[in-house]
Structures are given as structure tokens and as C-alpha cells.
Amino acid sequence: MDFGGSLGEVWRQGKIPVVLRRTGPGERLRLRIPLALSPGYSWLEKLGRHHPMWSGAPTYYWEVPKSWFDDFVDAALRSFGKVYIIQPYREHEVCAYNCRHAKGHECQCSCMGANHGSEHDEGWFDVTEAFAVKAGERQLACRLLQAKRS
């Protein structure tokens, strides 16, 4: 696994736990837990009935079932106060069939004219003549969760 840029920095930093949500069939969650700050890994094994799988050098991460996601995030927040979540997402573009097939120059669609009159229908899902959506390429996003202060 080779993340570039800031995702790579998040994955390689050693102070805050990181969970990589993988969504493909048979793929498992990947976890990075700070070694120096770890209160021990016994809490990780208590999250489910399966044993976490360790991937040693040079990658250094744990793999666990996807069903452990919520429990891991909660446990990491309790133990460390913070957790990074790296997850896939697809940006959605909104337009309309009538816009893409328009003949004039006036555009009142949310695409702001980017698709106006293009007659490109590939990838679009037309809900009605006035509303269509298109999913972008799959990308990875990262967010940092912090435990609420009491």
C-alpha cells in the first residue's frame, strides 16, 4: 500500500491510530496503532471473536474484519482520544438531461454550464429530465475524529 502526499503522511505518522476502510469483497480493515503509546493490544483482540492478523515489516499494520469498524473507532477514541479514518468515496456531479441536450446558451442547471449542450450521456443516471447524477472516480479521503471532552 503506497499512499502519496498527505494520506501517506497520515498513514506513516506514529501518534494517532489510523483505520483504512477497504470496501472490496473479502477485503479487511487495516489498522495502524502507535506502538510507543499503545496501552497494549489486548483491547484490540477483545473487539471480536477473530484474531487480528499482523502484517510485519515493511508495512506494519493489523488486519481485522470490516464488522469491527465502529468498535475499533470507539476503542481508539477511548484509548488515544483521536483516530484517523481513511475511506473511499465518490464525488457526485448533478446535472440534467435537458441541460446536456440544450441548444441555446442559457443554463440554469447546478452544473453551472459545464455540461450544457454537450450531448454526453455516458456515466449519467437520469432520474428525471430535470435531474441526473454521475459518480466520479473512486478516491480516498481522510478525516480525523476526536473524542468529546467531558
Image (tube, grey):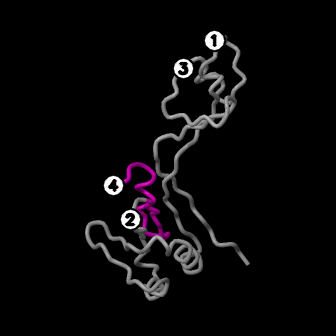
Residue sitting nearer the eye, 71 or 1: 71
Cβ–Cβ under 8 Å for marks 3 and 4: no
Cβ–Cβ under 8 Å for marks 2 and 1: no
Amino acid found under the numbered disc labelled 2: Glu
Tell me the SS state at disc 2: loop
| 97 is higher (above) or lower (below) than 47 | above
Residue sitting nearer the eye, 9 or 113: 113
Q: Position of residue 55 (x, y in %)?
A: 30, 72
Amino acid found under the numbered disc labelled 3: Glu
| Image disc number at residue 2 | 4
Mark closer to the chain start, 3 or 1: 1
**Residue position for label 2:** 27
Query: Which residues, given as a range, are shown in magenta?
Result: 1-23
Cβ–Cβ under 8 Å for marks 4 and 1: no
Q: CA distance from mark 4 to mark 2?
A: 17 Å
Q: Position of residue 45 (x, y in %)?
A: 44, 86
Tell me the SS state at disc 4: loop
Tell me the SS state at disc 3: loop
Q: Dot 3: few (<14), some (14–19), or many (≥20) neighbours within 10 Å?
A: some
Q: CA distance from mark 2 to mark 3?
A: 38 Å
**Residue position for label 3:** 119
Amino acid found under the numbered disc labelled 1: Lys
Query: Which residue is painted at 34% across and 77% down in the image?
Result: 53
